[in-house]
Image (cartoon, rainbow, N blue to C red):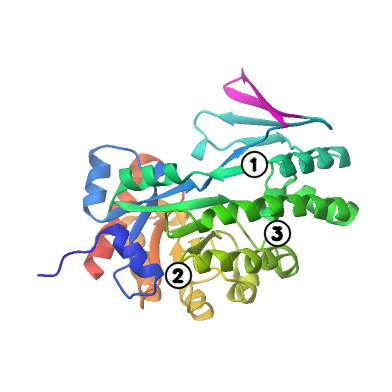
C-alpha cells in the first residue's frame, strides 16, 4: 500500500517539478487555533512559515521606540540615533488591523540628510545566522507544513517600503536625488550580500524573499535596472548550495512577464490570478515553464456564494493542471468567512485529487 505524502513532502515535490496533487497551504499566523482549524488540517490544509535566516545588530546605532495610545490607535515613534544625527519613523496601528499592519505617518527619509543617516544605518548592520531558530521551527512544524528561510526584502523593495521612502518618495528621488538614492541602494545591497551568504548555509531548502513586487509601480525599466541584476547576482549562490529561491510577487505581473522569465527565481509565491491579479495561471505557467506558481487565492472570491467559489476553484485547478502549482492562502479574513471558504477549497481539491 502506497503511503500518503505529507504536506511538507508534497510542497517539496511540487517545487522540484513532480506532478503531484497541488498542496494546499496557509500562512501560519493567519489560521486561528481550535476545532475548525483541526478540521481544515485534516482536510489537507498545511502551514507555511517564514522564519528569518539571520539576526541583525547595529553596534553604532541606538534604536529607540516610544509608543502612545491616541483615540484607539497605537502611535509608535522609532528613532535611529547615529553619529550623523537621528532619523525618525512614525507609524500608527489599530488593534484590529489585519496582519497588525501599521500605517506610516512619517517615513524615515524625508531629506538628503535622512538618506545619509540611513546609509550609515545600513552600513552599520551586522548579520549573524539564525540557524537554531530555523531548526526549532522545523522541529515544531514537522510534516504539517513547510518552513522557509526569509531573507527579507531586496534593496529596491526596502526603498519602496512606506517606512523608508514609499512609492511616492522613490518616484521623486529617482528624478531629484538619483545619486543619493543609488548610494543608499548600494549600501542596502552590500548588507543583503551578507544575508544571502548566510541563507546559502541555512538548514532549510527554500529561501524566501518578501518582495511584494507589483508592476503598478515597478515596471520593466525599473525591474531591469534594480531587480533583475540583484537576483542574477545573488540567486546563483543559493542554487549552488542546493536552495530554491522563492519570491513573493503578489501584484500586477503581466507587464513584467518577460522580465520574470529571465529572472533566476524558482518559485513565484503569492502569485494572485484574476480577478484581483492581471495574469491567469495558465498564461503564467506557459511563460514560466520551469517556475512553480505558489498562488494566493484571490481574496475577493471569499465573499462570493458557495457555488461561485466552487466553480472558480474548479476552473483554477483546471488551469493549474500539470504540476508546479501550490494553492496558497496569504490574505487575512474574518474567521467565519475563512472557515467556510477554506473548507470549500479543500473539498474541491480532495474531489479532484
User: Which of the two discs, 2 and 1, labels the residue nearer the N terminus?
Assistant: 1
Give the camera-side residue of 242 and 314.
Answer: 242
Quarter assignment of residue 324 = bottom left
Identify the image quadrant of the N terminus: bottom left
Give the mark nearest the N terminus, 3 or 2: 3
| Residue that label 3 marks | 217
Mark 1 is surrounded, within 10 Å at the Cα level, by few (under 14), some (14 to 19) or many (20 or more) other residues, namely: some
Give the spatial CA distance, label 3 vs label 2.
24 Å
Residue 40 visible in this rendered orientation of the protein:
yes
Q: Is residue 7 left or right of residue 115?
A: left
Check if mark 3's residue and mark 1's residue have beta carbons within 8 Å: no
In the image, which residues are magenta? Answer: 60-81
Residue 271 can be seen in this image: no
Q: Is residue 66 magenta?
A: yes
**Residue that badge 2 annotates:** 292
Q: Which residue is mark 1?
A: 126
Q: Tag 3's secondary structure?
A: loop
Most frequent secondary structure within the magenta stretch: strand
Separation of disc 3 and disc 1 at Cα? Answer: 31 Å
Amino acid at each position: 500500500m502506497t503511503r500518503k505524502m505529507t504536506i511538507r513532502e508534497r510542497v517539496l515535490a511540487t517545487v522540484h517539478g513532480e506532478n503531484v496533487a497541488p498542496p494546499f497551504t496557509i500562512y501560519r499566523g493567519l489560521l486561528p487555533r481550535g476545532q475548525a482549524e483541526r478540521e481544515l488540517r485534516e482536510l489537507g490544509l498545511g502551514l507555511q512559515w517564514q522564519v528569518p535566516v539571520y539576526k541583525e545588530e547595529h553596534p553604532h546605532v541606538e534604536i529607540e521606540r516610544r509608543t502612545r495610545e491616541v483615540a484607539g490607535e497605537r502611535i509608535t515613534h522609532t528613532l535611529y540615533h547615529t553619529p550623523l544625527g537621528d532619523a525618525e519613523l512614525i507609524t500608527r496601528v489599530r488593534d484590529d488591523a489585519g496582519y497588525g499592519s501599521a500605517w506610516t505617518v512619517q517615513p524615515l527619509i524625508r531629506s538628503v540628510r535622512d538618506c545619509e543617516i540611513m546609509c550609515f544605518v545600513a552600513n552599520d548592520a551586522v548579520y549573524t545566522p539564525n540557524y537554531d531558530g530555523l531548526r526549532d521551527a522545523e522541529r515544531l512544524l514537522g510534516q504539517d507544513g513547510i518552513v522557509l528561510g526569509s531573507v527579507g526584502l531586496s534593496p529596491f523593495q526596502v526603498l519602496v517600503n512606506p517606512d523608508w521612502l514609499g512609492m511616492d518618495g522613490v518616484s521623486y528621488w529617482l528624478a531629484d536625488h538619483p545619486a543619493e538614492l543609488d548610494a543608499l541602494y548600494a549600501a542596502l545591497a552590500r548588507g543583503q550580500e551578507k544575508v544571502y551568504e548566510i541563507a546559502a548555509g541555512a538548514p532549510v531548502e527554500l529561501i524566501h524573499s518578501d518582495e511584494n513586487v507589483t508592476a503598478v509601480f515597478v515596471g520593466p525599466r525599473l525591474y531591469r535596472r534594480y531587480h533583475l541584476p540583484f537576483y542574477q547576482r545573488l540567486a546563483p549562490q543559493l542554487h549552488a548550495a542546493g536552495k530554491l529561491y522563492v519570491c513573493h510577487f503578489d501584484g500586477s505581473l503581466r507587464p513584467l512577464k518577460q522580465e520574470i522569465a529571465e529572472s533566476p527565481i524558482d518559485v513565484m509565491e503569492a502569485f494572485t490570478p484574476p480577478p484581483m491579479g492581471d495574469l491567469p495561471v495558465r498564461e503564467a505557467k506557459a511563460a514560466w515553464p520551469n517556475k512553480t506558481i505558489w498562488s494566493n487565492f484571490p481574496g475577493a472570491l471569499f465573499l462570493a456564494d458557495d457555488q461561485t467559489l466552487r466553480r472558480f476553484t474548479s476552473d483554477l485547478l483546471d488551469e493549474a493542471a500539470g504540476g508546479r502549482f501550490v494553492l496558497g492562502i496569504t490574505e487575512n479574513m474574518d474567521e467565519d468567512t475563512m472557515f467556510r471558504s477554506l473548507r470549500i477549497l479543500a473539498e474541491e481539491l480532495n474531489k479532484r485529487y
